[in-house]
Image (cartoon, rainbow, N blue to C red):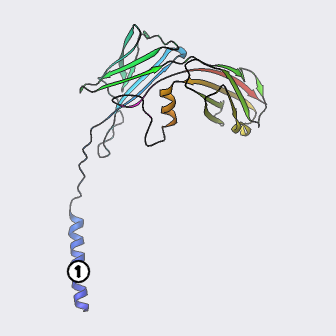
Amino acid sequence: MKRRCKIILFLLLLALLFACNDNPTVPDFDYEPEINVFGLLILNRQQKTIRIEQTYKVTDYFPEFRGVEDAQVWVSSGDQKVRFVHLFNGNYSDKENKLKLVPGETYYLRIDMPDGRKVTADCIMPAAPRILSPVTNESVPAFKALDVFWERAEFAHRYEIAVDDEFRNFKYSNFSDSTHIQLFPFIFAHPGRYNLKVASLDRNYFDHVRSRSNRDPILHIEGALGVFGAIAYDKSRFYAY
């Protein structure tokens, strides 16, 4: 009986040895790289950002520079049609600042990829809100909830409110669909100087930032992952005492 057990154990060890010597095989994924687009139009200073990248398989080498450099990119609105030129590593720019950003206007993105794929999206530019309180150089109590008020901005889908101190020890942001928010975390804010920003967000950008951590992002873009959105903002610098 003991001899039989030893033989069985020997055979198992032998099989395990040969199995370990086999070269591991990598599963073959039927995967086609996707296009990843980050496009943001900012009314303030007429800022425009469009970045195009390509996704990779987990088994591929993941390059440091993933930008798509040879796409054809246009943004149009009304009688405007502006081609964005490639600058570096997948970043495209309205180099001559021809595209005029105007509240209430709809902007259309079109990307033609070298392999024939196309990406389309559109967004509406919101107007900038106006902060009513706390305004620049206003003083508010520290260690107390902060009330922020602003004027309603046309075409804004939601508002994002962000507060931080000059040393970045305190940093907080939240969303609102009204023109007032009470920031309770400010009870942990020490005396000092603070920066406040209230931004109007279009639907596309709001859905993008609120679903970044989700497995299923909320997309308003055809032919790609990512976002093509618009924002406008107002800011102030106030003091807590």
Q: Residue at x 47, y 10 (%)?
A: 100
- Judged left or right of residue 104, residue 63 is left
- Judged left or right of residue 39, residue 158 is right
Q: Residue at x 62, y 25 (%)?
A: 197
Residue 235 spot, x, y in % from top left: 64, 21
Residue 28 spot, x, y in % from top left: 23, 49
Q: Start and end of the magenta stretch?
A: 212-230
Task: Determine whether the residue tagged by mark 1 lies in a helix, strand or loop.
Answer: helix
Residue 5 spot, x, y in % from top left: 25, 86
Q: Amino acid at mark 1?
A: Phe
Q: Does the magenta stretch mainly form a helix, a strand or a loop? A: loop
Q: Please tell me which residue lies in front, 59 or 41.
A: 41
Residue 99 spot, x, y in % from top left: 43, 11
Res. 36 image quadrant: top left
Reading the image, the residue beneath label 1 is 10
Is 186 covered by the magenta stretch? no
